[in-house]
Every structure is written in C-alpha cells, then in structure tokens.
Image (tube, rainbow, N blue to C red):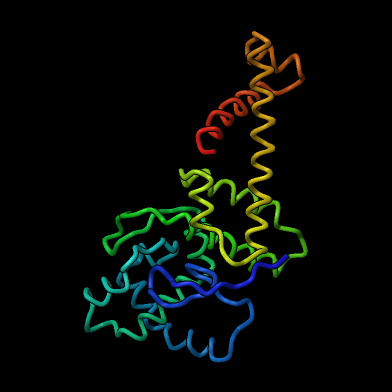
Amino acid sequence: MMISNANVTDPVTNQTAESGVASAPVAEQPGRSSRRQSVQPVLEKLFELYPKLFGAEFLPLKLGIFQDLLAAHPEQLERASLKVALGVHTRSTAYLRSVAAGKPRYNLLGEPVEAVAPEHVHLALLELFRRRQGRSAEDLRPKLRKQLTTAFEASGLTRQDYLARVQSNDPEANALLDEAFAERDQRLARQEALLGAFEKSGKSVEEFAALYGLDPRDVSRALKSDSAGKASS
C-alpha cells in the first residue's frame, strides 16, 4: 500500500504543497535540483540568522513566519526566493520528523508559541511513511499504525473530532487510520478485561501478576493505560 499525494495548503508558506505540511514526490521533478541550488543561499542565510530554527535540528515554524521573516529582514530576504526556500525546508525529511513528533511551533525568537495541529502531525506521519516505505522491503504499516494511535491520543480530541480533522480523500490513508483505531480498540478491550479480572480477584498487583504468570510492571502499565485510553475515547 502506498499513500498518494494530496494537494493542500502549506501552513507555513501558504502555498500549495503536496501531502500536507511538507511533502514531496520521491522522484525528482524536472528543475527541482536547479531550484534547490537557487534557494541554497537563502537557506544558508536563514541558518545564519536563526540557527536554533534552521540549524542541526529543524523546529516546526509558527504559522505566519513567512511574513515575520519578510518584515524582520526586508533588505536581506526577497519574497519569491524566501517562499521557495521555506517550501524546500518544510518539505525536508528532517523538518517532517519534528512535525510528526508533535513538537510545538516556534517564532523567530526561538520561543514555542503554538501546538502543531493534529492534522499536520497526521499528514507528516503519512508522508514519512510513504518516503520510508518506498525505500524499504519491510512492511512499515504496523509501525505507522502505532504512530497514528499515539498521535491521536496526544491530540486530546475525541475520536469523532479527530476524524473530522484528519480524514482525507485518500482511501489508503483512511484505511490505515481505521486499522490503527481497530488495533487500539482491541488493546483497550484486553486492558478492560484485565482490569475486570484484577478488580474481582481482590489481590495486589504482584499477587495478580504471579497468578497469571505476568510481569507486575506490565500489569501496572496496562491498568494505567486503561484509564488513559477511556479518557481519550
């Protein structure tokens, strides 16, 4: 299964970008290499001006940072080339990783100012999967399903609200999300059964674990996860 590209607006540059915040086709398009070379001086200038944002670690950029950069450096940054440079930057794998990890968005002062929207995290995860799967003989879908579940639970949204924000016109991406939720439902059902058995046993965690040949730490984690999972369902 390969995730297809969906054209949406890049939230940083406000220009159309493939597959969300920062995607790009695996194959090089005609002129892409020359375009990257043409914006390299701009990227180097951004690194020089804001090493925390554009240095060894790429941090998610606040919405509207394109306008902030133009206002802060009108003589050093030209509108068209900056727009292209930010597009290249936000479509890089390193930048996508930061977005997918759910790190906050940062302003020019290097301060976290807003959370990355759940739909942007979701799109970044799908794009990273697409790039990695295209280079790997291993089926990476199980790992992606776990990442999608983690992203949902971190969003703090109900399932209905989350689906309203992240579902797209890509049937394969939606199918992967459905599979992730199905796995989560099964896990929560097992945890609920474990909790019920534990409560009926009247035993301590250690005694209960010994009775069923389980690791007490696993039992404790399962009981905690059961409560957390119910809260986010």
Q: Give the residue drawn at x 35%, y 62%.
A: 52
Measured as percent of width and height from the top left, residue 156 is found at 46, 43
Residues 51 and 202: in front is 202
| Residue 70 vertical position relative to residue 96 in the rendered view, above or below | below
Q: Give the residue drawn at x 63%, y 14%.
A: 199
Measured as percent of width and height from the top left, residue 70 is found at 26, 77
Residue 45 falls left or right of residue 181: left
Measured as percent of width and height from the top left, residue 46 is found at 34, 74
- Quarter-of-image position of residue 138: bottom right
Residues 63 and 54: in front is 63
| Residue 93 vertical position relative to residue 87 in the rendered view, above or below | above
Q: Give the residue drawn at x 43%, y 82%.
A: 40
| Residue 204 vertical position relative to residue 110 in the rendered view, above or below | above
Residue 224 falls left or right of residue 108: right
- Quarter-of-image position of residue 108: bottom left
Q: Give the residue drawn at x 50%, y 55%.
A: 164
Residue 72 falls left or right of residue 79: left
